[in-house]
Image (cartoon, rainbow, N blue to C red):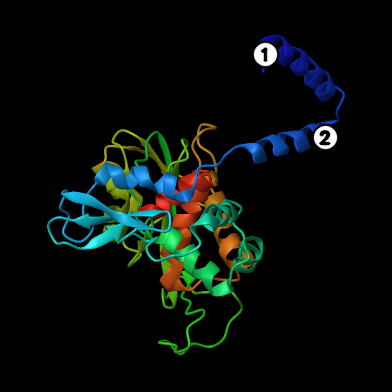
Amino acid sequence: MKTKSFVSKLNLITKALFSMTPAQREVVHQSIQALDTEISTDELIQPLFDALSQCPHCHSIHLKKWGKSGSIQRYRCKGCLKTFNNKTSTPLAKLRKSYLWEEYARCMVLKLTLREAANICHINLRTAFLWRHRFLSAQSGKNHDKLSGIIEVDEFFLAYSEKGSNTLTKQTKPRKRGGNIDKRTREGQVTVLLSIDRSNHMINPILSADTTAEIAANLAPNITENSVLCSDGSWSYVTIAKQKNCDHKRLINGKERVIDKVYHIQTVNGAIAHFKGWVNGKMKGVATKYLSNYLAWFRESNAKLNKQEILIAAYG
């Protein structure tokens, strides 16, 4: 298109946009986005594979292309002579319908239930369940975020659950979803440590025991020295603050909620309430064996990952 013709048409479009309502302009915006050519899942993954460029079986770097399976490039290792593609030995291996993965990742951004995601992507409920946990398995248990500045921390408790299991390992009385657990006995509960700083970095490891040693092992390596640690009255955090040379603000229940108008634990308490409301409410409870996956999903949601970033994280 010639420059004069383009400018003339651009002026007409601009005038038309100004005459539209905000809702009409949003429709135009969505239509333009739909015209954009989106990068395919394989095109998104290929650079990640190229960055490693090694055999997933023997880790040799001596590879050669070995034909294609459909549109997917295959490789052969010159060392072990095994063939593979760019998803072999990753959480995405042997999953089909890769053209739907980005749409499913969008459902995860929206934190939809299995049935909602299955209906949108037109897939089986079992497939939706498999994809959810494959997309999360690479990040499950990875709590490597470095926390700095003002850091809030607290632990919370969830009832042990064997949801979906045909054979129960623990014979417990039926209870309402989420349940009421006795924190004093520590029986039938799972302890989760959640810590977040004011830059929105988060860790949420599952603790094997609610002890000072276990809390320190999971929290101390992630804290930057000379930070400010805000916690409740637990003595466990006093030890960690001294170990990391951090200023420690103890907010004891019933005495102080905010110190110096800056230091509080309301952000971490809000995150805990959000997580518990999400898993026990919208998700109708989660099995304890999958809890680390849902905590990884919560971290991704807190970091506001988009659908492509979720796929990159799923690749591992």
> Is any part of residue 203 visible from this angle?
no
Quarter occupied by residue 189:
bottom left
Q: Earlier in the sequence, mark 1 or mark 2?
A: 1
Mark-to-mark CA distance, 1 and 2: 29 Å
Q: Secondary structure at mark 1?
A: loop
Q: Amino acid at mark 2?
A: Gln
How packed mark 2 is, by other alpha carbons closer than 10 Å (few <14, some 14-19, many 20 or more), is few
* Closer to us: 49 or 156: 49
Q: How many marks?
A: 2
Quarter occupied by residue 180:
bottom right
As drawn, which residue projects farthest toward the left? 79
Residue 6 lies left or right of residue 117; in this view the side is: right
Q: Position of residue 199 (x, y in %)?
A: 46, 35
Q: Amino acid at mark 1?
A: Lys
| Mark seen at residue 145 | none
Residue holding disc 1: 2
In the figure, 53 relative to 291: above or below? above
> Which residue is located at x 56 percent, y 55 percent?
108
> Which residue is located at x 14 percent, y 61 percent?
80
Q: Position of residue 133 (x, y in %)?
A: 45, 65
* Closer to us: 82 or 95: 82
Residue 304 lies left or right of residue 214; in this view the side is: right
* Closer to us: 108 or 143: 108
Q: Position of residue 115 (x, y in %)?
A: 63, 68
Residue 64 lies left or right of residue 297; in this view the side is: left
Residue holding disc 2: 24
